[in-house]
Image (spheres, grey):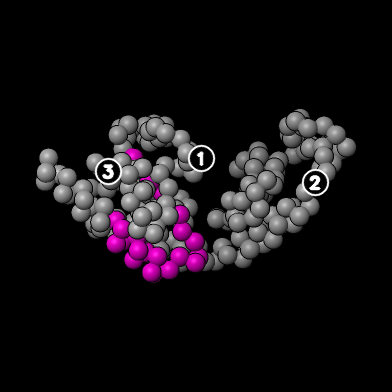
Amino acid sequence: AGRVPIDLSAGYADYLILSSHKIGGPKGVGAIVAASDLMMPKPLINGGGQEKGHRGGTENLAAIAGFGAAAHEALAGLPATDAVRQRRDEIEAIVKSLVPDAEIFGTGAPRLANTAFFAIAGVKAETAQIAFDLAGVALSAGSACSSGKVGPSHVLKAMGYGDSLGALRVSIGPATGAEDIELFRVALAGITARRADRERAA
């Protein structure tokens, strides 16, 4: 939600669970959309009957209003998705140009326009993340839901990739410009040059 159009009347899911911070809203607020009130889970917190009895306790109205404002902004920003996708494709083209043996995950599959996920053989994700950080580029090692965890990605293992493959995730947005992409290119060029030096010395 907030990244791709969703038609709730299509009936493709029993539940839609939303986190405000994923679309730029405040942390600590979200929503559960169920196909029917009969399908809502039993409340974990009982109390004064707030939120139709699904969650007791005083609502955080400021956070809820912030979530609503973020949702309006996300909806208004959906037309910019094509421009964001084009910048993501530029980043992936740079990766393939500088590192022909890089693995870019999800190519050719329906996916988010704002995220590139790739791995470079012989380069540890954590080491590359530090190198990018020193060059002024913020990115993450692994998926968003596994940030801070040490060890190989269980998802990549399930896809048939080895334990030694470290993946990097680049997330961009409408404000990402050509200068940001150039900064990424320069940083990646430095990382690949050091990899080549190590391979020659081995």
Q: Please state which amino acid type lies under the numbered disc 1.
A: Cys
Residue at the limit of the structure toward the right, as seen here: 48
Question: For the residues marked 1 and 2, what is the alpha-carbon distance in whole angstroms?
Answer: 26 Å
SS for tag 3?
Answer: loop
Q: Residue at x 43, y 68 (%)?
A: 177
Left or right: 5 as drawn, with respect to 194: right
Please say if the residues under marks 1 and 3 sit with CB atoms less than 8 Å apart.
no
Labels 2 and 3: the sequence-earlier one:
2
Please say if the residues under marks 2 and 3 sit with CB atoms less than 8 Å apart.
no
> What's drawn in magenta, residue-wise?
166-188
Q: Please state which amino acid type lies under the numbered disc 3.
A: Val
Q: In this orientation, which residue lies closer to the viewer: 134 or 171?
A: 134
Question: For the residues marked 1 and 3, what is the alpha-carbon distance in whole angstroms?
Answer: 22 Å
Q: Counting other residues with Cα less than 10 Å from the Cα at mark 2, is it few (<14), some (14-19), or many (20 or more)? A: few
- Give the labeled residue for mark 2: 59
Mark sitting on residue 123: 3
Q: Counting other residues with Cα less than 10 Å from the Cα at mark 3, is it few (<14), some (14-19), or many (20 or more)? A: some
- Residue 167 lies, in percent from the top left, at 36, 43
Write down the quadrant of residue 85 in the picture: bottom left
Q: Which one is closest to the eye, mark 1 or mark 3?
A: 3
Labels 1 and 2: the sequence-earlier one:
2
Q: For the C terminus, which image quadrant?
A: top left
- Give the labeled residue for mark 1: 145
